[in-house]
Amino acid sequence: MSPAILQQLPEAARASADGQKRQVDLWVLAGIAFAAAAIAAGIAATGVSLAYFFQPTAALIVLGGTFGVMFITTPGNALIHSARRIGGLFWARRGSPETQIEEIISFARIARTKGLLSIEPLIEQASNSFLRESLLLALDMNDRAHLEAALQTKLRLRERHGEIDAKTLDVAGGFAPTIGILGTVVGLIDVLRRFSDLSSVASGLGTAFVSTIYGLALANLILLPAAHRIRARVVEAFEAQELTVEGVLCVFDGLHPTLIRERLNCYLRRKDGLN
């Protein structure tokens, strides 16, 4: 891309073109650290060694059983997509609505002065994929109603994909405690098999119930919180993409940048809970 064209890009898009680095979501890391510290402190307060809770057999039953259920209930491509979505939870969303508005207005200025097709060389450097795809649709369509329908369909599909990812973790979180109980029953059977040795029975009972703890912890500390976090991210992305849809329609209509800014600022006021 030539320097002349690059200079026309919105600031947010230029930052993306220059290789903007992702930032770690500190809230997620803080939540994990806080939960782990609280649980470790609670266990330490009972006087029981943390090493006692590391039971390979219990972990094998709970993790293997839970992941097996996920393989049964969820198609392979959906599992891969869910795994990528979980990995993305550790990274904060880049950009702000204000920056996105400025980027859309920059495209609108160019389209208004030089024609809609003049933005085509700049689209690849847009700061996010949804904006790129939406602008390309605007170039390919002549009818506003058809463009709006296509953008709304794309918006709903993205929302549905996020819900599918969250549902995958919801299902796994529902089964994990039950599989933990299954592991406990297996442990109790082993204890009863050695019932003649009372000392081994006492220690075996404690070991057996570790499976239940694993199942509850996997569900309530990892799977279900991750599902809720995915839904929160989907809502956040949906709001940003709604703004993008409205902005691209304004660019398509050739509206004045001042009017576009006023329209898009309504989304900021709605997000802040203002009238």
Image (cartoon, helix red, strand yellow):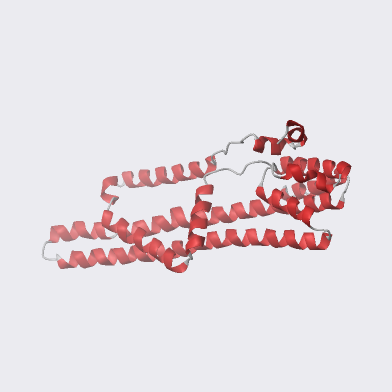
Considering every residue shown, the one lying at the far left of the view is: 196
Name the side, left or right, on which 171 lies relative to 55.
Answer: right
Name the side, left or right, on which 79 lies relative to 180.
Answer: right
**Residue 59 rendering spot, x and y as whole percentages:** 31, 56
**Residue 149 rendering spot, x and y as whole percentages:** 76, 63
Quarter placement of the N terminus? top right
Q: Which quadrant holds residue 109?
A: top right
- Does residue 257 appear in the picture of this structure? yes
**Residue 102 rendering spot, x and y as whole percentages:** 77, 40
Q: Report the residue at 73% width, 54% height from top.
A: 242
Q: Which quadrant holds residue 19?
A: top right
Q: Report the residue at 53% width, 63% height from top.
A: 167
Name the side, left or right, on which 112 lies relative to 90.
Answer: right
**Residue 210 rendering spot, x and y as whole percentages:** 30, 57
Q: Which quadrant holds residue 94?
A: top right
The answer to whether residue 117 is above or below residue 14 is: below
Give 86 or 133, whichever is nearer the viewer. 133
Give 177 or 122, whichever is nearer the viewer. 122
Give 155 or 193, whichever is nearer the viewer. 155
